């Protein structure tokens, strides 16, 4: 049976089915950033952490609302356990940073010939933080920043700030979940439209270009990322270097997402352009069952590794694997998501972090059959007090991936 909903209309017709889906989505407000800062400071005080450095990037955005990019220059903020946030940046960027400021705080500037690391130590002294204090350094900061601070400090205990940042960021608020729900809905609509415009001879690069247009049509800036694979290339989880041309009966794997008010979506669909074989159906159904086994194992309080084990255990019962061997699932079952496409916690063996309300995960125990095909069905779920809840309903079947009527 030819796959339902695949190759039914032109790209122009497919785009015409889409419209802006962002009108009800509200960005994170200053009040929530202040609450995040308060939560971090409470944790820091309880764990004898005197301050943390937030580097330009998602940690800076999460706590302060300021959007800036990591570069070869030190730009960030010091969040003390007591007191107000202090920004640090080159003098010539201060005017620009003022325009991005959501949470007020002084910007301490350094000239190009001066050391930002010495300035960092000076700011700590102004905050009455002594040279024996414990200071967390943003886990995403480039090594040169840690190295620069370390070379000028005398007695500080420099630690990984992840204990604080992950503590705050792992459990999402209702507002964060609403933004991700909006983004996920947008990307699922893009997936369905994309499937409908496939045709024999189309290239993966042409599909990627369509997906960008489609994400823009639903209100996103474009794709945050996009992987399009045909045929044997689907057996490489993150793609191959060369474009492919779609042929009848090829396996199709599309993994894409967008960003809405800084929060991300990430959905993968796999189906056949044409008619699926019995072997493809068997592996596709195993993938769907493994994804469901992982979802059913996601209960408040169970460790992250138990979710991974549930998917892997089902696959082993079908003669796949075992563990990370192929044919089977060569990577973890899932990752956290939020401001970063991959963030804590991870659904992987050895991770004993207990599931808690507000945690958000991908569920994608991909099956790889080397030199044949790969099948990844990726949807995300979030934890509620009652258990796991899907952001998007999983794919229906290999012959009707979007659950359409004939």
Image (cartoon, rainbow, N blue to C red):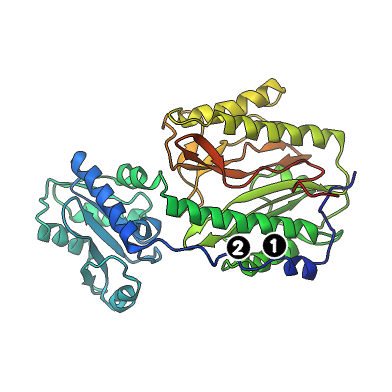
Circle 2 residue: 223
Residue 46 in view in this figure: yes
Find residue 211 and report its image quarter.
bottom right
The quarter of the picture where residue 175 lies is bottom left
For the residues marked 1 and 2, what is the alpha-carbon distance in whole angstroms?
9 Å
**Which disc is residue 208 wearing?**
1
Badge 1 marks a residue whose secondary structure is helix
Number of residues whose C-alpha sits closer than 10 Å to that of mark 1, classed few (under 14), some (14–19) or many (20 or more): some
Please state which of residues 267 and 94 is positioned toward the viewer in this rendering.
Answer: 267
From the viewer's perspective, is residue 63 above or below residue 380? Answer: below
Q: Quadrant of residue 96?
A: bottom left
User: Residue 293 location, x and y as percent?
Assistant: 62, 29
Foreground pick, 387 / 343: 387
> Which residue sits at x=38%, y=66%?
68
Q: Residue at x 43, y 39 (%)?
A: 357
| Residue 249 vertical position relative to residue 58 in the rendered view, above or below | above
The residue sitting at 22% across, 72% down in the picture is 109
Helix, strand or loop under label 2: loop
Q: Left or right of 141: which side holds 374?
A: right
Mark 1 vs 2: CB contact within 8 A: yes
- The one nearer the camera, 12 or 242, is 12
- Residue at the location (59% across, 36% down)? 331
The percent coordinates of residue 358 (x first, y second) are: 44, 43
For the N terminus, the quadrant is: top right
Disc marking residue 325: none
Task: State which tag comes first along the sequence, 1 or 2.
Answer: 1
Residue 134 located left or right of residue 253: left
Asked whether residue 243 appears in the rendered view, the answer is no
Residue 198 position in % (x across, y down): 81, 59
Residue 218 placed where, x, y %? 63, 66
Q: Is residue 15 left or right of residue 129?
A: right
Q: Nearer the viewer, residue 340 or 391?
A: 391
């Amino acid at each position: 049976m030819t796959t339902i909903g695949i190759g039914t209309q032109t790209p122009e017709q497919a785009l015409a089915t889409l419209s802006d889906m962002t009108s009800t989505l509200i960005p994170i407000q200053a009040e929530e950033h202040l609450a995040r800062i308060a939560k971090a400071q409470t944790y820091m005080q309880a764990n004898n952490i005197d301050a943390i450095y937030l580097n330009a990037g998602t940690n800076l955005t999460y706590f302060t609302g300021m959007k800036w990019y990591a570069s070869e220059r030190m730009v960030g903020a010091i969040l003390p356990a007591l007191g107000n946030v202090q920004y640090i940046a080159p003098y010539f960027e201060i005017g620009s940073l003022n325009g991005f400021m959501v949470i007020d705080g002084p910007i301490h500037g350094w000239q190009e010939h001066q050391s930002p690391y010495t300035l960092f130590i000076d700011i700590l002294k102004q905050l009455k933080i002594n040279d024996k204090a414990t200071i967390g350094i943003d886990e995403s900061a480039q090594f040169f920043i840690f190295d620069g601070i370390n070379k000028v400090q005398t007695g500080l205990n420099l630690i990984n700030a992840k204990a604080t940042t992950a503590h705050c960021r792992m459990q999402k608020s209702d507002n964060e979940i609403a933004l991700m729900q909006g983004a996920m809905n947008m990307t699922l609509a893009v997936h369905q439209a994309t499937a409908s415009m496939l045709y024999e001879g189309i290239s993966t690069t042409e599909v990627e270009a369509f997906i960008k247009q489609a994400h823009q049509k639903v209100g996103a800036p474009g794709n945050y990322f996009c992987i399009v694979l045909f045929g044997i290339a689907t057996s490489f989880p993150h793609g191959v270097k060369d474009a492919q041309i779609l042929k009848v009966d090829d396996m199709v794997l599309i993994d894409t997402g967008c960003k809405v008010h800084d929060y991300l979506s990430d959905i993968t669909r796999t189906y056949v352009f044409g008619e699926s074989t019995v072997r493809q159906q068997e592996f596709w159904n195993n993938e769907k069952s493994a994804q469901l086994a992982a979802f059913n194992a996601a209960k408040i309080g169970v460790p992250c590794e138990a979710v991974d084990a549930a998917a892997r255990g089902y696959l082993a019962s079908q003669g796949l694997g075992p563990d990370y061997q192929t044919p089977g699932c060569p990577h973890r079952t899932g990752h956290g998501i939020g401001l970063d496409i991959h963030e804590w916690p991870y659904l992987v063996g050895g991770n004993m972090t207990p599931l808690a309300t507000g945690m958000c995960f991908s569920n994608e125990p991909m099956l790889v059959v080397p030199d044949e095909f790969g099948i990844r069905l990726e949807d995300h779920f979030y934890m509620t007090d009652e258990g796991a809840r899907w952001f998007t309903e999983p794919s229906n079947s290999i012959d009707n991936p979007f659950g359409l009527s004939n």
